[in-house]
Image (cartoon, rainbow, N blue to C red):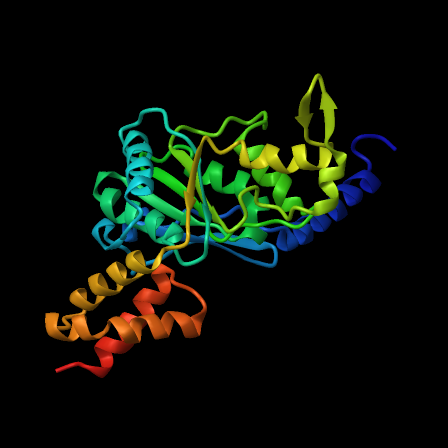
């Protein structure tokens, strides 16, 4: 068959048609959103298609509304301030008891620094495999992006675990300076820990060294340079938060003083004295005693 033969021309024509049909099935690269339309975005994947969706009305929290976590606020605020100014900053892992303000603190940072160019991109755990695509989408943008992974935890051998690990540290493709990762979790090391793993520990010169399974789990959380721990509130702290929110909701001082017993009963029924429970009680009480 010569280069000008009809058979070769027909072959290339069929090949071109085949490639055209394949292009229709292949996912298009994600398009950039209207960056000026919002300060917060959500990564959405529907089958083979993925995109960044603007969140026009994000749930923003004032730093002043976060009670009894002053140390955590100060440390994350300092880290975020460095990041917004273009200085070196660390990825942050916020762990601890549920309802103690981990996610709210991240949202408060967005509210505080949005006018300085801070933007937030929420990424669900099941979409962490797309982190390289998200990174490339924002790499050349002038804004500073927090990739926010809320309520993060992994089971053994989940592929998203390795994807996050690679982006945090270890990938050949460098993460640009305008991206940082903030994650919240109820698990300190993001993965379940089993009693049997303690038997893998071994003694070396009198020192206890964890086994390989434990080392693997620790290796992910250690890639976060900033660890912030949140603890359950005691009764006085819980009541302080209740009073704060009742005041914010316009409840009078006299009614706030009378709410103490009901607030404690509410926490007892919920089995928790968290900030979230305090906020929920305050909403209920303010609604019932509105003037």
Image quadrant in which the N terminus is located: top right
Image quadrant in which the C terminus is located: bottom left
Residue 77, compared with residue 148, is above or below; it is: above
Residue 233, compared with residue 112, is above or below; it is: below
Indicate left or right for 270 with 168 as reference. Answer: left
Residue 71, compared with residue 255, is above or below; it is: above
Task: Give the percent coordinates (x, y) of residue 255.
Answer: 15, 75
Image point 42% across, 36% down: which residue?
Answer: 180
* Residue in front for this viewpoint, 106 or 55: 106
Farthest residue, direction right: 1
**Based on the displayed image, in which of its 4 quarters is residue 229 positioned?**
top left
**Based on the displayed image, in which of its 4 quarters is residue 227 positioned?**
top left
Image point 33% across, 38% down: which residue?
Answer: 76
* Residue in front for this viewpoint, 71 or 2: 71
Farthest residue, direction top: 205
Task: Give the percent coordinates (x, y) of residue 52.
Answer: 44, 51
Indicate left or right for 125 with 109 as reference. Answer: right
Indicate left or right for 23 with 79 as reference. Answer: right
Task: Give the percent coordinates (x, y) of residue 155.
Answer: 66, 50
Image point 33% across, 44% down: which residue?
Answer: 119
């Amino acid at each position: 068959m010569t280069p000008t033969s009809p058979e070769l021309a027909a072959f290339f024509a069929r090949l071109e048609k085949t490639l055209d049909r394949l292009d229709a099935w292949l996912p298009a690269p994600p398009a950039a959103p209207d960056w000026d339309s919002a300060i917060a975005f959500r990564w959405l994947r529907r089958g083979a298609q993925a995109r960044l969706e603007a969140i026009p009305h994000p749930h923003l929290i004032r730093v002043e509304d976060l009670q009894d976590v002053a140390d955590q606020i100060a440390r994350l605020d300092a880290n975020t301030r460095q990041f917004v100014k273009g200085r070196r900053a660390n990825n942050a892992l916020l762990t601890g008891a549920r309802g103690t303000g981990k996610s709210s603190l991240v949202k408060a940072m967005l509210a505080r620094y949005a006018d300085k160019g801070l933007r937030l991109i929420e990424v669900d755990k099941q979409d962490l495999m797309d982190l390289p695509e998200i990174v490339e989408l924002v790499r050349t943008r002038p804004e500073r992006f927090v990739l926010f992974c809320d309520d993060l935890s992994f089971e053994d051998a989940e592929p998203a675990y390795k994807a996050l690990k690679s982006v945090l540290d270890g990938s050949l493709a460098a993460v640009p300076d305008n991206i940082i990762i903030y994650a919240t979790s109820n698990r300190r090391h993001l993965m379940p820990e089993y009693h049997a793993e303690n038997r893998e520990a071994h003694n070396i010169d009198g020192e206890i060294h964890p086994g390989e399974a434990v080392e693997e789990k620790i290796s992910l959380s250690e890639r976060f340079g900033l660890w912030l721990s949140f603890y359950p509130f005691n009764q006085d702290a819980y009541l302080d938060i209740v009073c704060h929110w009742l005041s914010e909701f316009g409840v009078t001082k006299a009614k706030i003083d009378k709410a103490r017993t009901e607030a404690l009963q509410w926490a007892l029924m919920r089995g928790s004295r968290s900030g979230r429970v305090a906020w929920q009680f305050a909403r209920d009480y303010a609604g019932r005693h509105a003037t």
